[in-house]
Amino acid sequence: MGPFAFQRSGFLTSLSIPHDTYPYRNRIKFGDVALGQRFYDPISQEYFVKRSDSMAAMVTGIGDGTVPDEFEADDVVGIDQ
């Protein structure tokens, strides 16, 4: 097997970290995420909480949940199971 493996959700994860440390993620469009729901953005590789139809706040990494970021309704994001 190569240096990368696909999880069930389709996001790439490195094999150097045990597989069971990653939650399974369902892919969903940003427009289908509920207000207040936490989701994973595969572009920034950070978690956000949806605040409005086009805005979300980063809650991991450098984000403290107060700075909004813009998303398009058809952006694909991940929801942890």
Image (cartoon, rainbow, N blue to C red):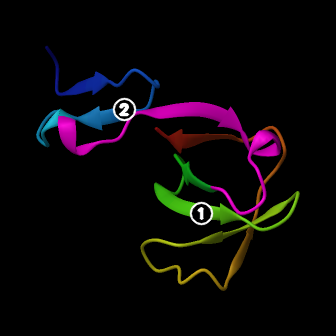
Q: Residue at x 55, y 42 (%)?
A: 79
Q: Crowding at label 1, few (<14), some or many (≥20) Cα neighbours within 10 Å?
A: many
In the rendered image, the vertical position of residue 45 relative to residue 11, given as above or below = below
Are circles 2 and 1 on residues that touch, CB within 8 Å?
no
Q: What residue type is disc 1 on?
A: Phe
How far across and how far down the image is residue 74, in percent?
81, 37
Q: Examine the structure image and report whether residue 3 is included in the region drawn in magenta.
A: no
- Residue 21, by quadrant, is top left
Q: Which residue is mark 1?
A: 48
What range is drawn magenta here? 20-37
Q: Which residue is mark 2?
A: 12
Q: Nearer the viewer, residue 23 or 77?
A: 23
Describe the element under mark 2 as helix, strand or loop. strand
Q: Residue at x 35, y 41 (%)?
A: 23
How far across and how far down the image is residue 49, in percent?
64, 64
CA gap, disc 2 to disc 1?
A: 19 Å
**What numbered label is drawn on residue 15?**
none
Q: Residue at x 59, y 63 (%)?
A: 48
Q: Residue at x 88, y 57 (%)?
A: 53
Describe the element under mark 1 as helix, strand or loop. strand
Which residue ends up furthest to the top in the rendered image? 1
In the rendered image, the vertical position of residue 26 relative to residue 48, given as above or below = above
Q: What residue type is disc 2 on?
A: Leu
- Residue 57, by quadrant, is bottom right
How far across and how far down the image is residue 5, in percent?
26, 23
In the rendered image, the vertical position of residue 31 relative to residue 58, given as above or below = above
